[in-house]
Amino acid sequence: MTDPTTTKVITDNVREEAGKWRELSDDMGAVKSNPVGNQGLMLGPTAFFIGPTELVATAAHSSAYQTYYEHVQKLVAGAVTEWEQLGGALDRIAAEFDRTDQTEKADLEKIYTQP
């Protein structure tokens, strides 16, 4: 029977999960750099024009869309970086568990710092 205060980590699975996060980062990188997916979603004020008496509403809707569009672009750019970092952190977790042979207390603080 396993000691209830210990945890067994299958490091191959942790590394496999790291690879999945890197693939997701690459996918988001493609979205970020794709001119159709990136600039192709940008809409100018005329996209919100509904009539000559609605110029104020057109400007307001266009501004709201532009603000949201910029927010989504920041999220996509952040995902590229952060998901790559998550993959790296998982690799460091697996390496630390391998290094300690899962028998000693691992210092997990260094996992979340840059190598």
Image (cartoon, rainbow, N blue to C red):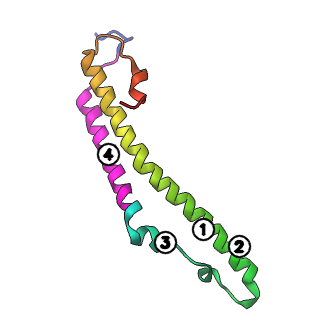
**Residue for point 37% across, 11% down:** 4
Q: Percent from the top left, x then y, of residue 40?
A: 45, 74
Q: What stretch is highlighted in magenta?
A: 7-31
On-image quarter of the N terminus = top left
**Disc number for residue 66:** 1
Q: Is the magenta stretch mostly helix, strand or loop?
A: helix
**Badge 4 or badge 3: first in the primary sequence:** 4
Spatial CA distance of label 2 from label 3 is 18 Å
Label 2: how many Cα within 10 Å (few below 14, some 14–19, many 20+): some
Check residue 2 for magenta coloring. Answer: no
**Badge 3 or badge 1: first in the primary sequence:** 3
For label 2, the residue is 60
Q: Which amino acid does label 2 sit on?
A: Ala
Label 3: how many Cα within 10 Å (few below 14, some 14–19, many 20+): few
Q: In this view, does 6 lie to the left or right of 11?
A: right
Q: Which amino acid does label 4 sit on?
A: Arg
- Per the image, label 1 sits on a secondary structure element best described as helix
**Badge 2 or badge 3: first in the primary sequence:** 3
On-image quarter of the C terminus = top left
Q: What residue type is labelled 1?
A: Gln
Q: In this view, does 87 lie to the left or right of 12?
A: right
In the image, farthest residue toward the bottom: 52
For label 3, the residue is 41
Spatial CA distance of label 3 from label 1 is 10 Å
For label 4, the residue is 22
**Badge 4 or badge 1: first in the primary sequence:** 4
